[in-house]
Image (cartoon, rainbow, N blue to C red):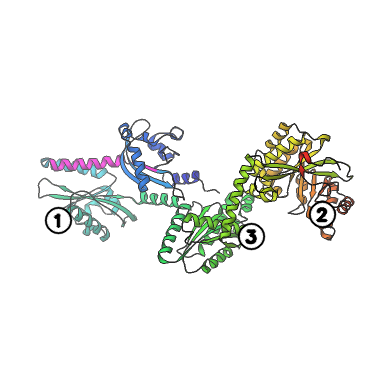
Amino acid sequence: MNENPDTFYRLLVESVTDYAIYMLDPGGHVANWNAGAQRTKGYMAHEILGQHFSLFYSPQERRNKTPVANLNIARATGRFEDQGWRYRKDGSAFWAHVVIDAIHDEGGQLVGYAKITRDITERREYEQQILRAKDLAEAQSERMTAMSRFLDTIISSIPSCVLVEDAVSREILLVNRKAEQLFGVEKNSMHGKKPHECLPPELSDYFDMLADAALRSEGIHQSERQLSAAGGERILHTRAATVRGGDARTQYVMLIVDDVTDQRAADARIHHMAHHDYLTSLPNRILFRQRLSDALRQGELHERQTAALCLDLDNFKNVNDALGHQMGDELLRAIAKRLRAVLREQDTLARIGGDEFAIVLPSLNHQQEANVVAQRLIEVVHPPVNVDGHNLSVGLSIGIAFADAELASPEQLLRCADMALYEAKRNGRNRYEYFTLEMDVQARTRRCMENDLREAITENQMRLYYQPITNSDQQAIIGYEALMRWHHPSKGLIMPGDFIPLAEETGLIHSLGAWALYEACREAKNWAGGQAVSVNLSPIQFKNSALVSVVEDALRGSGLEPWRLEVEITESVLLDDTLGNIHILQSLKALGVLIALDDFGTGYSSLSYLRSFPFDKIKIDRSFINDMSDSREALAIIRAITGMSRSLDIQITAEGVENREQFDKLKEEGCTLFQGYFFGRPQPSELRLTML
């Protein structure tokens, strides 16, 4: 679902097949290459990618730094347009119409250039022939008849429409076949008549206006207008010039008309695709930022409030993963229509990526209006969407930020709306939240903590503490669970609950998890008695295709026997990409590693998990242990888990055991392994409890 450059480029090629369209990086090197470019310039993509676009210019132009000058104009003004000679791979030259558009990201930074080149050699040759014929006709009056016939031949075959009028009588003297086709009038019906006598009023008035302009002053006069022609509404680009006859008393007006409807439609499509999302046709990030900037300027000018909203669909990923991207795309299109339908005409709804949308609400009288809009958006998304017989339900979380003296730029406003969105998702989703200064403080704190966490990894501030695990005889320690601790240089000891969620969110969990595996295996190798070590794996680590290799390298590097390593996973691993994660667990099992299901009973516990994978252990969550003396339900769950485990021949570990009463009761219920403060607190390897 990602809106990527390859998709965008492919759509361009499909839309405009007779243009060479390609991208340049900020330095002018070719970044991609379409089939039209290959046909026009002769280079295959692998030959040209990475080359500087100046190789399409002549050696003299390169010495004069003409290509660089053209890029500078595009960067300074946003657009460079010109005609000139360009060169193909085989050295042949062609006359090109070139457009270079500077492309900027939403932050205003130059990211490259879009370059559109069209081979117009044939059209230029026709125009040159016309001009040469015109010059010959003016210079050699005695050969006017012969030149007129020559001009007739040329004009009748060129792809542009040509009309020649007498400057005095304004009668049409010459019409070519292309003009007959465009206007739907035979040339014999136009010869000797004035335009208004043989053409529709709209066309004749247009041509008269240009002829008058040409007669008033020398040079070529151009105009472009949408008019009714034989084929319907067409966009006509017309050039008018005067031509002297054999003597000073004879003068003509020549009109050259090109139907540029298809070309302008292609230009409009290219412009639309550069500013709109290809899937929903909503504005994209670039256009959204422009609209937000305009709204902020107008709001300041007219003293009205402007709000920015960041939206995120709840539960969309599950729909996308379960039913596929095509279903997800259809759902996004339907949701986009619903959102747009409840907004005002002047509001801007944009898709800024994946299942994320953003809205500009300009010209608000008071903040309460944004409340109404936000609630309306949540309600309109709530009903299920039927896609190919599937009723798909998603929710909507919204963050809202209002512009003020402190939030005066689009970047600031969007950042704050995004913080408010994060708060809405954190507070339960399917709701909206307003940005507050406290959110900014929290965000800064999180960024500081993230920076500290990155430093902690590189500066070896992490340590593993080990909590003993014993059997029902309580005679010996059979293993330890490795628990991570962060020794912060100024904040002291930081527990996992305070930094593991941040590590998972930022992706640092992959580095931390790999370190924990290596360190636990290295230290366990030196323990006497063959005691095992248990290491927790985050669900995020299963998104790393190299996880099995990381475990294998940790075992190989430390020399630890595989049966002495136990990895603990939670039920969420089995909820997310079940087949892929089951495959990873099977690969770990094949290494000889033991697999334990942690926190069983607290999430979406299902017997299907135990059928889909042969776990070595199940760990009963400490919450049931704490409540079993006061809660019949907690005790019933413990009995159900132990009974099921005995039937499946799976060991049971009770964690969080804090006293003799709990220990005795759990033994009575059939638990086989125990862990908790009653047996020992987590300690560094050198201080760990080695016997009970």
Question: Outermost residue toward the front?
Answer: 490
Amino acid under disc 3: Asn
| 289 vs 486, nearest the viewer | 486
Question: Label 3 to label 2, Cα distance in Å?
Answer: 28 Å
| Residue numbers of the magenta segment | 115-139
Could you say which is closer to the camera, residue 237 or residue 246?
A: 237
Q: Amino acid at mark 1?
A: Ser
Q: Is residue 18 left or right of residue 237?
A: right
- The local crowd at label 1, few if under 14, some if 14 to 19, many if 20 or more residues have their Cα within 10 Å, is few
Q: Residues within 10 Å of mark 2 (few under 14, many from 20)?
A: many
Task: Identify the secondary structure beneath mark 3.
Answer: loop
Res. 507 visible in picture: no
Q: Main secondary structure of the magenta part?
A: helix
**Residue 157 placement: quadrant:** top left
Pick whichever of labels 3 and 1 is earlier in the sequence: 1
| Circle 3 Cα neighbour tier, 10 Å, few/some/many (<14 / 14–19 / ≥20) | few
Contact, CB < 8 Å: mark 3 with mark 2? no
Q: Is residue 629 left or right of residue 460?
A: right
Q: Secondary structure at mark 1?
A: loop
Magenta segment includes 13: no
> Residue tagged by mark 1?
169
